[in-house]
Every structure is written in structure tokens, then in C-alpha cells.
Image (spheres, rainbow, N blue to C red):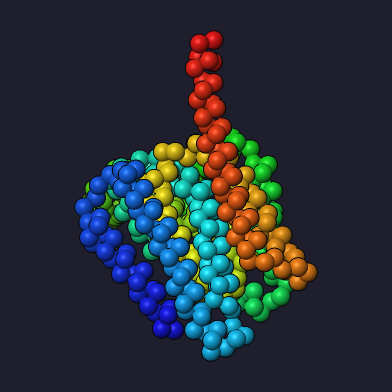
Amino acid sequence: MLVWSLFILAVLLFLALDLGVFNKTPHVISSKEAGKWTAVWVTLSFAFSGVIYWLYQSNYIANPDQLKPAEASIKFLTGYLIELSLSADNIFVIAIIFTSFKIAQKYQHRVLFWGIIGAIVFRGLMIFFGVILIRKVDWITYVFGSFLVFTAVKMLFKKDEEEFNPKESTIYKIIGKVIPIAHHRDKEHFIIRENNRNYATPLLVALLVIEVMDVVFALDSVPAILAITSDPFLVFSSNIFAILGLRSMYFFLANMLQKFSYLEYSLIAILTFVGLKMLLVHVFKFPEWVSLSFIAVSLITGIVVSLKMAEKENREKPSRDEE
């Protein structure tokens, strides 16, 4: 309980510093600034695997039946990379939502900040109940595994013309029934009052749509991490580190998403792998280094192929223009 309390306290402390100090004044976050914060979060996440090793070493010395420290560190990193890789689609959807509701760049960080607060709560609840199911109901692993494989197949055969339109979503219609939606913004406010009535600004609508979409994406990512470990602290901490780094990744990658068009195939491979891992859990257990290596190689391959193909298309474009 002490470890859990200190971890959550550290997360809340950073979030308070983030909004109250580092980003007290709304501003446009440049790619350079976002790149620095992305590097900071990736470094902190890998460094925390050392903290995991130290924590679980103490447990292992006291009780050799507990998870070995090296295995715990690898499981944490594997879960972190899974969540980070599955965030690629989330980043794309966030970009669509901001564009659809015409959210100014200098206010996007504020929306994502409060979105992370909600994501931490919802992910925590999903992980809590997911771990209970995994430990109490043996066959639930087959359900999770089948769902992940189904999701991977669905992504593979998804049609390009299928696009997400936030203003046609169910959550947008529900918000409109609960509170009138204003079609103009009042700086960084989520709710404005006019003519003795409260109105939801586009910032609030964008925030709520992002929250709902995060829950939808968590239906894939949480079972995927549970395929690696059912240790609640490892699942939660790896999830939180990936979520905290998602904002800086968004501002760093939002303008370059088209360059990573082949990364989706990496996600399909990862979902298929972890799905099969859950389906075969009672027949064969993959070593931890195999899972970590497969996920890392899949991500690197997707990034390299995407950049190579983008470079090839740029070289061929002048030739097509001349024709």
C-alpha cells in the first residue's frame, strides 16, 4: 500500500506541476518542446524499470515464490511498449477531434491534461476488475485473447474510407441533450454562462469525446497488458507512464502521422501475438524476453518501413508531377 500511495502521489504531484508551473499560461507547444518532453518520459519510463527491479528484489528476498525482479522489470517494459504502440491510433483520433471542433493549438494541452485525469481513473477501474477476472475466472483469458485476435483481423481488413466523425458520434449527441453546446470558444473555459444558461464549449465537448474514445481504446490495450502479467502494480504503472507521455507524443507526432502509415501493421502483429499468447497460456508460456523482443522488433520494423516508403514516395512525386 505504501508503494501504491507513493506512486499515485508522485503522479498527482507531477500533474499539479504540469498545469500550475510548466504550462500555467496556454501556449502553442512546438515540435521541439514536445520532442524534449517525449524524451524525458521515455527515459523516466525505462529508468522506472530499475525501480521495479529494486522493489521486487526486496519482495523476492523475503519470499522466493514471488515474481523475480528481472522478470518484473521486463514485464513492466513490455506492458509499457504495448500501451505506447497502441497509442498511435489514439493520437490519430485525438488529431481528428481537435480539427473537427476547431480547438486552437494553445488550448489543446489543457484539454489533454484533464483528459489524462479521467484516463487514469478509468484505466485504474478497468485494470482492477480485469485483474480480478483473470485471477478468479480461468477461461476469461480465452475471451480476452479471442477479442484481441478479432480486433487485429478487423484492423487488417478495415476499409480506408471508414473515417471517424466526432460530430456524428453518440457521445456528441448525448452531450447536446444534457447541456446546450456553444459553437464559439471563450478562451480556455469548458463551460460558459449566457442568458442565465450554461453552455458547453467546444473544449468540453472535445474533452468528453476524447475520454470516451480512450475507454474504447483501453478495451484493446488493457487486455493486451493483462496477457503479459496480472500483477496490478505492473499493469497500472506501465499504463500510467504511457498515458503521461501520450500528450507530448501527440504534439511531437501529430503533424507526422502520415509518415508512419505502415505502423498499423505493427499494431496488428502485436495484437495478434498477445492474443495468441493468451489463448495458449495453459499450453505454452512464452519467455518474457520473447514478448519484449517481438514487440520491440515489430515497432522498429513498422517505423523503418514507414519512413522508407515515405521517402520513396517523395522521390517519385516530382516525376509524376512532370508527367
Can see residue 299? yes
The x and y percentages for residue 243 are 44, 59
Q: Quadrant of the N terminus?
A: bottom left
Residue occupying the point 50% across, 55% down = 84
Can see residue 142? no
- Which is nearer the eye, 9 or 215? 9
The x and y percentages for residue 204 are 35, 53
- 212 with respect to 5 (left or right): right
Residue occupying the point 44% across, 68% down = 48
Residue furthest out toward the top: 323
Residue furthest out toward the right: 283
Task: Work out whether 56 lies above or below 253.
Answer: below
The x and y percentages for residue 160 are 60, 36
- 110 with respect to 222 (left or right): left
On the image, which quarter does residue 253 sit in?
A: top left
Residue occupying the point 23% across, 62% down = 20
- 215 with respect to 252 (left or right): right
Residue furthest out toward the bottom: 62
Q: Quadrant of the C terminus?
A: top right
Residue occupying the point 50% across, 11% down = 322
On the image, which quarter does residue 114 sit in?
A: bottom left
Task: Work out whether 270 lies above or below 288.
Answer: above
